[in-house]
Image (cartoon, rainbow, N blue to C red):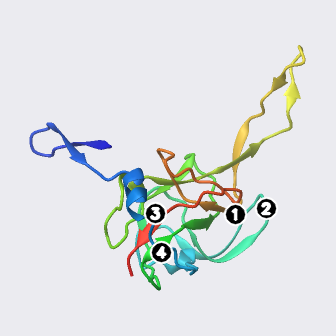
Amino acid sequence: MLSRRQTAKSGDLSYEQQQTYSDYYDTYSGQTRPNAEILLNGADFQSADCAQYEVGSYTGEEDGSTRDNALIWNSADGSFTYTIQVPETGVYSIEATYCPLASNTSEISFSLAIDGEIPYDTASRLTLNEVYRNRENMKEDSKGNQVRPTQVQTEMWRTCWIGDSDHYLAGGCRDAQRRRLVQIRH
């Protein structure tokens, strides 16, 4: 897969070959899959490039469940860096528990770097979906046709596999059977 980027000096377009997820998968799919679980709380970030955030407990309005040690961040600006230590080199699956705050976006975007490097092209465009529900019950018009109700965002804790914006890593919540492959060096 080729990616396009603007060259700063001349304005010409240049192309740079980047490893695709498919290439990455082919390279590491046969590697060891350690039987280890590494837990990381939202409040466990190493650095923040953001002025507006809190850490603490948060309760989702839709499901009423509360999580402690959460990062409460309602801004599209800034970034947070997390560092983990893995017990051994291998292939790990990545799952996230999050509560999307009501906003004007349809998804939460983030990137994944391993040892400071983006491992494949779409790892810079990972996403977690917002949660929507019907504002009211389904109605029928005068001819008996169902009328789709308005959708509204809601805050609800979800546990999902991460996914990218190109849907090569189709993120899925709780019922997903495919796990994402990420090779992490010890």
Q: Is residue 107 above or below residue 35?
A: above
In the depicted view, which residue is nearer to us: 83 or 103?
Answer: 83
> In the picture, which quadrant includes the C terminus?
bottom left
Mark 1 and mark 2 residues within 8 Å of each other at the beta carbon: yes
Mark 1 and mark 4 residues within 8 Å of each other at the beta carbon: no
* Mark in the foreground, 3 or 1: 3
Instruction: Decide which of tag 3 and tag 2 comes sooner along the chain.
Output: 3
The disc at residue 63 is 2
Disc 4 designates what residue? 32
Residue 5: image x %, image y %?
Answer: 24, 43
In the depicted view, which residue is nearer to us: 119 or 73?
Answer: 119
Q: Is residue 76 above or below residue 104?
A: below
* Mark in the foreground, 3 or 2: 3
The answer to whether residue 124 is seen in the rendering is: yes
Local secondary structure at mark 2: loop
Which amino acid lies under the numbered mark 1 shown in the image of this protein?
A: Trp
Residue 39: image x %, image y %?
Answer: 58, 79
Distance of label 4 from label 2 (alpha carbons):
38 Å
Could you say which quadrant of the image residue 82 lies in? bottom left
Disc 1 designates what residue? 157
Residue 63: image x %, image y %?
Answer: 79, 61
The answer to whether residue 50 is seen in the rendering is: no
Local secondary structure at mark 1: loop
Distance of label 3 from label 1 (alpha carbons):
31 Å
Distance of label 3 from label 2 (alpha carbons):
37 Å
Disc 3 designates what residue? 29
Which amino acid lies under the numbered mark 3 shown in the image of this protein?
A: Ser
- Residue found at the far top of this picture: 143
Which amino acid lies under the numbered mark 2 shown in the image of this protein?
A: Asp
* Identity of the residue drawn at 89% across and 15% down: 142
Local secondary structure at mark 4: loop
